[in-house]
Amino acid sequence: MVALDISTSMLADDIKPSRLERARLEIADLMQRLEGDEVALVLFSGASFVQFPLTSDYATARKFLEGAEPGVISKPGTNVGDALRTALNAFDAESGSQKVLLLITDGEAHDADTLRVAQEVADQGVRIYTIGFGSPEGAPVPQVDAFGRVAGTKLDAQGLPVISRLDEGTLQEIARIGGGVYARAETGGQELVVLTDALAQMQRGDVGETTDVRRMERFQLFLGLALAALLAATLIPDTLAARRKPQRAARAPAPAAAAKTPPATQRGG
């Protein structure tokens, strides 16, 4: 289960081309490294939701990943605790395989109960790994317009640029509570090597597939055609009969001419 931060702070460009773009690229790379493991995506900022559920259809998952933008969630902020709850509820409770949650964010959580929720998730047998995107020095947070386009820099109440900095301490603590590992995103993507090596050592479950054939009634079309043909059959004979009557009258033979009486023969007196 991947929980991806799509708050506006993830648009900061201290990681090129931006934190969010690099995160999407690394998630796509992670899918290529998975060997049949199911993957799901939770998007979060001030709220969270499941972008797509657990699936091994990586091609479709990548298409959904492309739509991970800040404008998808209208509530601002970074509520990591809510994202952890959403991810926990999206797991299959009946699955016997090891459950893994990968949290991708810059770590600037705006909720106070993040660590408590992380403990709740860990108590349910979920191992939590965290990857931090950004730098401790930080970078200005872009301002986004109504169409999701970057339009300048976000300013605070004093008119100064809002700076977003990577909070490694929170992410390290979440990983510790969840029995996982924290890594900072790097140019070479070495953090993914650590993650995939850890996944290879975990308990796996068998995923079965069933096909359910559901037949759909299609008789309505043929029934409609049959009724139309029946109606036409009742109308066609009367129409043809009406058309044939004048033709028969025109073709009828003329009445025989009256026989002429031969003139009487005059006889001499």
Image (cartoon, helix red, strand yellow):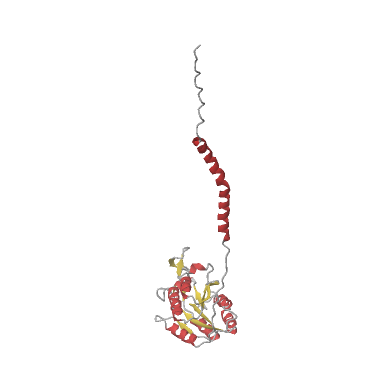
Q: Position of residue 91 (x, y in %)?
A: 57, 78
Q: Position of residue 196 (x, y in %)?
A: 46, 84
Q: Residue furthest bottom?
A: 201
Query: Toward the viewer: 217 or 262?
Result: 262
Residue 14 placement, left or right of 83: left
In the rendered picture of this protein, how many numbered marks are placed on residues? 0
Q: Residue furthest front?
A: 269
Residue visible at 49% across and 36% down in the picture: 251
Query: Toward the viewer: 26 or 111?
Result: 26
Q: Residue furthest top?
A: 269
Q: Position of residue 132 (x, y in %)?
A: 47, 80
Residue 142 placement, left or right of 93: left
- When asked about the image quadrant of residue 225, the answer is bottom right
Residue visible at 57% across and 43% down in the picture: 238
Q: Is residue 102 above or below residue 224?
A: below
Query: Toward the viewer: 264 or 214?
Result: 264
Whether residue 59 is visible here, answered yes or no, is yes
Q: Is residue 251 above or below residue 230?
A: above
Residue visible at 49% across and 69% down in the picture: 70
Q: Position of residue 185 (x, y in %)?
A: 44, 80
Whether residue 133 is visible here, answered yes or no, is no
